[in-house]
Amino acid sequence: MNDKVNRLHQLGVLGQSVWFDYISRGLIGSGGLQRLIDEDDVRGVTSNPSIFEKAIGSGEGYDDDILRLAREGLDAAQIFDRLAIDDVRAACDVFAPVYLGMGGEDGFVSIEVSPKLAYDTPATIAEAHRLFAAVDRPNVMVKIPGTREGIPAIRECLAEGLNINITLMFSMAHFEGVAEAFLLGLEARSKRQVTLRNVSSVASFFVSRVDTLVDRLLDDKIAMGAEAERLNGLKGRLGVANSKLVYERFVQILASARWRRLAGAGTKVQRLLWASTGTKNPAYSDVLYVDELIGPLTINTLPEATLNAFRDHGRPVRTIDTGYDDARRLMRELAEVGIDVSAATERLQKEGVDLFTKAYEGVVGIVDKRRQALLAADGAGA
């Protein structure tokens, strides 16, 4: 490949969109987000409580608004809500030309329902509607976790015309539940004879966290005297294999008569989005979870370090639909050595909800400290 060609642009040629896994007021206001669009063909942004915890906790860029909202009598949780909505709305405006230029296929910015509602279906539905209306942009996506209680909320919100990004998916069972919710939601919408073309959805499938947990389980077996050479050979492989098998199932769904009926009525594909694609283990390639998962009708949401690494030395080659047999073989081998992949992925989803809840509480705590300090200084200066 010509080194002068941006490798991130090559992903678009191969049918994969790059989204940026970060948002902040500074990134938007400085023109940094626009540069990512112009120079790296970034086509969307994802956010979550952890990202806002980092953004709001860094520097003083939010202080003026925190003080203004505190003077209005808002508490910390309400202030955070307003800050997040404002940032997402501003990012949606930056991506509006992408959204319009690509016919509504890309250019989305995601905002997440409070993780505290992950196991409450009616509250999730209500909160998704509130956030969708509050941002009030056609290219906003509301993130709902793919928990057992989240699935009916996803179905209902899609049926009602909301753009939905389903998060915290780790297994084939999670994906199939989400895909079914998508089909049912759009079928219900079709029966009401309302437009299907303006509803967009992505299914965010987490990758690196699977290897982090399963590698640790394999290390535990090695420490107990199990066959080290064999177990070491299984490490660092499940994240990619798990994702490839989900992609294989995704393609099968798109070949079904059921999907063809919806597609004929104008329904957009619910694309697979690879999430958690920053490499956690320094022993593995820093672009492992990009290089191995490239293909059409997919998105990879990249943290800054991974985006920079792929631009520098990634391999823009279609890889997503290779190695299916090897992936199935790995699943069998893991079962043979006593690794329960199903149990591990259920554990990861629960831990994901817990981590996002902790981050949500963390960012509200940061806002509360700033709120109190700014009000105190404001009072002292009055």
Image (cartoon, rainbow, N blue to C red):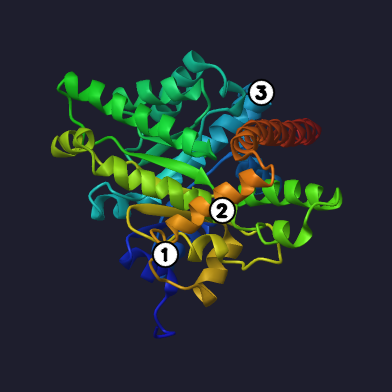
Image quadrant holding the N terminus, namely bottom left
Using a 10 Å C-alpha cutoff, classify the residue at mark 1 as few (fewer than 14 neighbours), some (14 to 19) or many (20 or more).
Answer: some
Is residue 71 visible in this depiction of the protein?
no
Is residue 53 visible in this depiction of the protein?
yes
Which element type, helix, strand or loop, lies under badge 3?
loop
Q: Amino acid at mark 3?
A: Asp
Q: Amino acid at mark 1?
A: Thr
- Between the residue at mark 1 and the residue at mark 2, the CA separation in whole angstroms equals 17 Å
Q: Residue at x 61, y 64 (%)?
A: 305
Work out whether 25 lies above or below 2.
above
Q: Residue at x 43, y 55 (%)?
A: 324
Q: Amino acid at mark 2?
A: Leu
Going from the N terminus, do you reach mark 3 or mark 1 first?
3
Image quadrant holding the C terminus, namely top right
In the rendered image, residue 272, in percent from the top left (x then y), is placed at: 40, 46
Using a 10 Å C-alpha cutoff, classify the residue at mark 3 as few (fewer than 14 neighbours), some (14 to 19) or many (20 or more).
Answer: some
Numbered label tally: 3
Going from the N terminus, do you reach mark 1 or mark 2 first?
1
In the rendered image, residue 101, in percent from the top left (x then y), is placed at: 24, 55
Reading the image, the residue beneath label 2 is 330
Which element type, helix, strand or loop, lies under badge 1?
loop
- Contact check, label 1 and label 2, Cβ < 8 Å: no
Q: Residue at x 41, y 84 (%)?
A: 4
Apparent side of residue 198 relative to residue 146 in the rendered image (left or right): left
- Between the residue at mark 2 and the residue at mark 3, the CA separation in whole angstroms equals 50 Å
From the image, state whether disc 3 or disc 1 is nearer to you: 1
Using a 10 Å C-alpha cutoff, classify the residue at mark 2 as few (fewer than 14 neighbours), some (14 to 19) or many (20 or more).
Answer: some
| Residue 75, disc | 3
Reading the image, the residue beneath label 1 is 319
